[in-house]
Image: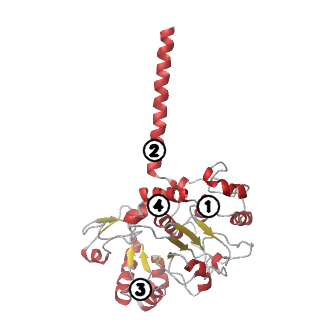
Amino acid sequence: MKWALVIAFRKLTVTSVFMLTSCCIMLVFWELNCDWSLVTLPRPWMKNDRKVWKRCEQQNIWSTHTNSSKNVSDLITEVTGLMHCDWERNTTEQNRHRALLHSCCNASGGLFLAQTNTHIGQHLIFEAERKKKYTLNQELYNMLPQSVPWNKGNLGHCAVVGNGGILLNSSCGAEIDKADFIIRLNIPPMNYSSDIGTKTHLVTINPSQIINSFRALAYARMPFVSRVSEFGPASLVLPMFSFTACQDPSLRALYTLMEGSPKTQVLLNHPDYMYCLASKWKRLKKRLSSGFIYTSIALELCQQVHLYGFWPFPLDLSHKPLPNHYYDNVGPVKNVHAMPQEFQLLLQLHRQGALQLHVGPCAH
């Protein structure tokens, strides 16, 4: 009987050690794969957030689920309450997200196509059409920068400026212009300087804009050159290898700017980086918006990240009707992006102190 108990105890011990080891391996595997789309709200007992929770422990706006049964008006009321809480920068959270993004996607080394991360004859696989390839030729290779811009990160205080109607009459322009590095999305109109500022360092464009707003550059090209010139010395980013349909309009834009605005640096997103980033946020189940993509990029490359113009609701903080964009009321294309879910994740990052989300008027 005694020996039977000893043998049973040894088996139990071996089993326990095996299970514990397996759990540790799974945790390490999860961390290395950095599926940080599962980011969760901070809890009252987390030391890094204790000061925020002392002031705002009742502000439990979002559940960990992406869908909410609350109506828009109730959500806006609660978001307003959260924005009245004192925001506190959390360098621990910033560094954690920066490390996770660097390990899974590496914007500093692979965000843009460059001569250092490509070679002539390389088959570039389109981000969203993985069976389609583009063979990099000598001509396009020569147009690429020698190295990836901003490959050392450390861009300092960054502002990512969305185009939401919440920016209208916000008087945020002066505050935005104080940033060291300013990112704008989809070449927006710049004649709202008091609300959006005047400076730009990086601006994106959607190929659909080239097709719809500039007639695919098949006719007069100067309106396009003139529009891009509004952003001064800013670099322009083309998502040439997102879909095969993006290839031709992006090439036309590239050649047009080489002739009409040779000082404008044109950058091409690396499809491998974009695919990796989309994979890490696959929980959203829809295509990432430009704003969410460049927020992720800023989290890796910047020391501080401030967001403006991110607002998925048709009402402002006072529950008054709001245009979709600060410059027009054209609605978003349905079922393409998961805007409310993206905003939820941005709120979580705001509460963690990893970035600061600015909604409503800016204080002076």
Instruction: Indicate which label's residue lies in the foreground, 2 or 3.
Output: 2
The residue that disc 2 covers is: 28
Instruction: Indicate which label's residue lies in the foreground, 1 or 2.
Output: 2
Of the numbered discs in the image, which one, if any, rests on residue 256?
none
* N-term mark: 2 or 3: 2
Q: Where is 214 relative to 99, above or below?
A: below
Q: Where is 342 relative to 321, above or below?
A: above
Quarter assignment of residue 149: bottom left
In the image, what residue type sits under mark 1? Gln
Asked if marks 1 and 2 touch (Cβ < 8 Å), the reply is no
The residue that disc 3 covers is: 217
Which residue is found at the position 65% from the left and 64% from the top? Answer: 87
* N-term mark: 1 or 2: 2
Task: Report helix, strand or loop for mark 3.
Answer: helix
Instruction: Indicate which label's residue lies in the foreground, 3 or 1.
Output: 1
Of the numbered discs in the image, which one, if any, rests on residue 278?
4
Asked if marks 4 and 3 touch (Cβ < 8 Å), the reply is no
Task: Report helix, strand or loop for mark 4.
Answer: helix
Q: Where is 53 relative to 1, above or below?
A: below
Observer-nearest residue: 337 or 347?
347
Instruction: Indicate which label's residue lies in the foreground, 2 or 4.
Output: 2
Alpha-carbon span between mark 4 and mark 3: 29 Å
In the image, what residue type sits under mark 4? Ala
